[in-house]
């Protein structure tokens, strides 16, 4: 029997940032075993985060660990975050984190959704003793999400067009088949439509550029 997931009940949701909670104390920050670009954070009290939420970190040494990242929840008092490059060991000063939570609203009546274009940059490290071109992998580009919707002239569809004009970066969530959840920061870089054809419904197409990591949950 197939384990294929049906497309029906797939949803695209735009996030709106809510007021941040006060900064909370971190207990430990350590490189996750076998994953040099993953940090595991343990908090002094329950963090109240959900996978895909953003958390801003300050006061950490090494300073390269400070910044705002989407989180992957492990337990009530621990979560993981993905650095843009390899970590440099456990933190010697742990600082605080501030949760940036989002509420999500559906993009109405999507008819197809496609993730694509994920790639890794190729860094040329050839040198004078090389006998052929040599490369190492660079940063991951998580590509884009393309989708089509029935044209409804809704506030949300008009918001997509406004987002493109205003270069708005926000959180997005795609729930595939009502089961698999992917959350990421991104922005609308392409918006087409509405398209009208003889004896047919109108539709619009949009593309989101993914910025940073994709959190699955």
Image: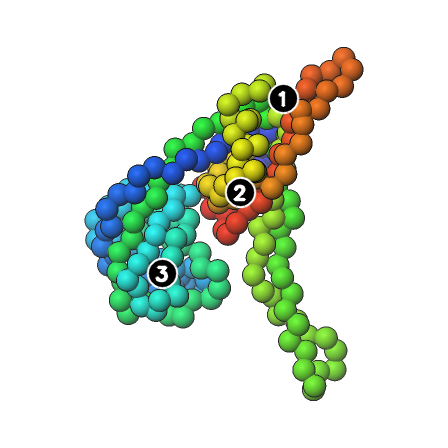
Badge 1 crowding class, 10 Å Cα cut-off, few under 14, some 14 to 19, many 20 or more, is some
For marks 2 and 3, the one nearer the N-term is 3
28 vs 103, nearest the viewer: 103
Whether tag 1 and tag 2 are in contact, CB under 8 A, the answer is no
Question: Of circles 1 and 2, which is in front?
Answer: 2
Q: Could you give the CA–CA distance between mark 1 and mark 3, rounded to whole angstroms?
A: 42 Å
How far is the residue under mark 2 from the one under mark 3? 25 Å
Give the quarter of the figure containing the C terminus.
top left
Which label's residue is closer to the chain start, 1 or 2? 1
Whole-percent x and y of residue 36? 45, 65
At a point 23% along the width and 51% down the height, the residue shown is 24
Q: Is 116 left or right of 168, judged from the image as shown?
A: right
Dot 1 and dot 3 residues touching (CB under 8 Å): no
Asked which secondary structure carries label 3, the reply is loop
Query: Residue 154, relative to residue 52: is it above or below?
Result: above
Whether residue 204 appears in this view of the structure is yes
Mark 2 residue element: loop
Residue 167 has which mark?
2
**Residue shown at 23%/46% (left/top)?**
22
Please give the name of the residue rendered at 39% of the width and 66% of the height, measured from the top-left corner: 64
Query: Would you name the residue on which mark 1 appears?
Result: 150
**Residue 145 appears in which quarter of the rendering?**
top right
């Amino acid at each position: 029997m197939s384990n294929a997931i049906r497309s029906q009940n797939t949803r695209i949701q735009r996030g709106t940032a809510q007021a941040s909670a006060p900064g909370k104390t971190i207990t430990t920050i350590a490189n996750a075993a076998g994953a040099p670009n993953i940090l595991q954070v343990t908090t002094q009290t329950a963090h109240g985060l959900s996978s895909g939420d953003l958390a801003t970190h300050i006061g950490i040494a090494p300073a390269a660990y400070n910044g705002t990242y989407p989180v992957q929840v492990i337990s009530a008092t621990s979560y993981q975050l993905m650095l843009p490059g390899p970590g440099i060991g456990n933190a010697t000063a742990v600082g605080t984190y501030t949760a940036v939570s989002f509420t999500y609203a559906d993009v109405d009546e999507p008819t197809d959704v496609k993730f694509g274009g994920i790639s890794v940059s190729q860094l040329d490290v050839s040198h004078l003793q090389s006998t052929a071109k040599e490369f190492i992998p660079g940063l991951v580009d998580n590509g884009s999400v393309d989708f089509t919707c029935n044209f409804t002239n809704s506030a949300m569809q008009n918001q997509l067009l406004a987002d493109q004009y205003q270069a708005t970066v926000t959180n997005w969530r795609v729930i595939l088949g009502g089961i698999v959840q992917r959350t990421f920061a991104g922005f609308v870089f392409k918006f087409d439509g509405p398209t009208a054809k003889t004896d047919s419904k109108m539709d619009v197409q949009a593309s989101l550029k993914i910025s940073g990591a994709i959190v699955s949950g």
